Image (cartoon, helix red, strand yellow):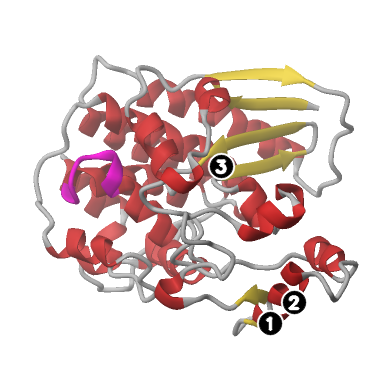
Amino acid sequence: MKIVKPKFYKNFKCIAGDCPDSCCQGWEVDADRDSLEYYNTLPDSLEIKQRIDRVLSYDEFGNTIFTLAAKKRCPFLNSENLCDMHIAIGGEHTPYTCRTFPRFIYDFGATREIGVSFSCPVASDMMYNLDEFDFEQELNDELPTLNDIDAQTYYTLFKARNTAYSIAKNRNLTVSDRLVELLHFAQKIQSELGEYDEGGDSIGFFDVFKNPELINPEWEQRVDNHDEKAVSNSRANENIIMYFLYKYFMQAVYDLDVISKVKMAVVGVLVNTYFGEDSWGVHLWSKETEHSQYNMDRYKKLLKYADCLSVQSLINRIS
């Protein structure tokens, strides 16, 4: 299998208890099936087994979760902001989400793409301040994953994303002009994939970012105190575009919606522009949106149906 990852990926390291915004606080954690099966093998006399049994619950979707403690802290997060479960039975037996965060892993048959998300403040700071958002690849002995991906669609999107990367990195253009070109390019690729009917929801632009599930009140303050200004030609904005293109563009192979994927890059730059222009603001947005299923589902719908996020509305906003 071919493994693709950003060149900076190997430099990422969790800082655990020193993290300024712990990933073990603010959202519920699913207990995946493999982890649950392992917990059932633990002796009932073991203290950590008793603690696990006490906090297992279900969310509104029927997923098994750990009931949060006060201030939305994971029940296993101790006073030093370290994980008692990790300490007691090893990190390899913590839930899948905990083991992998903030990494994302996408398999496309014989290719696996991995990276880290802005939702982690360390990863956010790293990506925000990159000199160059580039990639490297390696081969391993793993067999390709089974999938029902249409090969022609994948190939079309793969070539298109490389073109999108080139547009994003064209420093002969302003960042605003690059975003406009990306939107027009997405429309061209979309015409090859299928129709794209957008608009119909009259929500205000800044109301888009008032998520129903609030994880950190500081994000709400950022939205309320937004500064509507022009997009700067910063390297950070280029890196944000590259992040969204890398993470989401190829997901169009499943839903044939490439325009919404490119809109995410445009909105990502606007998040940085309007809500603080620093890595912390992008981190807050990502933690609120990318890692809340409820908020993310809402956001995906708005990308397509909010009038304020139509291609033309975004072009008008950034031009």
Label 2 environment density (alpha carbons within 10 Å; few <14, some 14–19, many ≥20): few
From mark 1 to mark 2, how far is it between C-alphas?
Answer: 6 Å
| Residue 305 image point, x, y percent | 38, 67
Answer yes or no: is residue 15 visible.
Answer: yes
Magenta segment includes 45: no
- Above or below, comparing residue 136 to residue 65 in the picture: above
Disc 1 target residue: 54
Q: For the residues marked 3 and 1, what is the alpha-carbon distance in whole angstroms? A: 53 Å
Mark carried by residue 50: 2
Q: Secondary structure at mark 3?
A: helix
Please report the residue visible at 32 percent of the width from the left and 32 percent of the height from the top.
Answer: 181
Name the residue: 39% across, 61% down. 288
Residue occupying image coordinates x 56% and y 71%: 75
The boundaries of the magenta stretch are: 274-281
Q: Which mark is residue 250?
A: none
Q: Tag 1, which secondary structure? A: helix
- How far from the left and from the top, in percent, is residue 313? 23, 54
Query: What amino acid is at disc 1?
Result: Arg
Give the class, few, some or many, for how many residues have Cα within 10 Å of label 1's Cα (few <14, many ≥20).
Answer: few
Q: Which residue bears the numbered disc 3?
A: 192
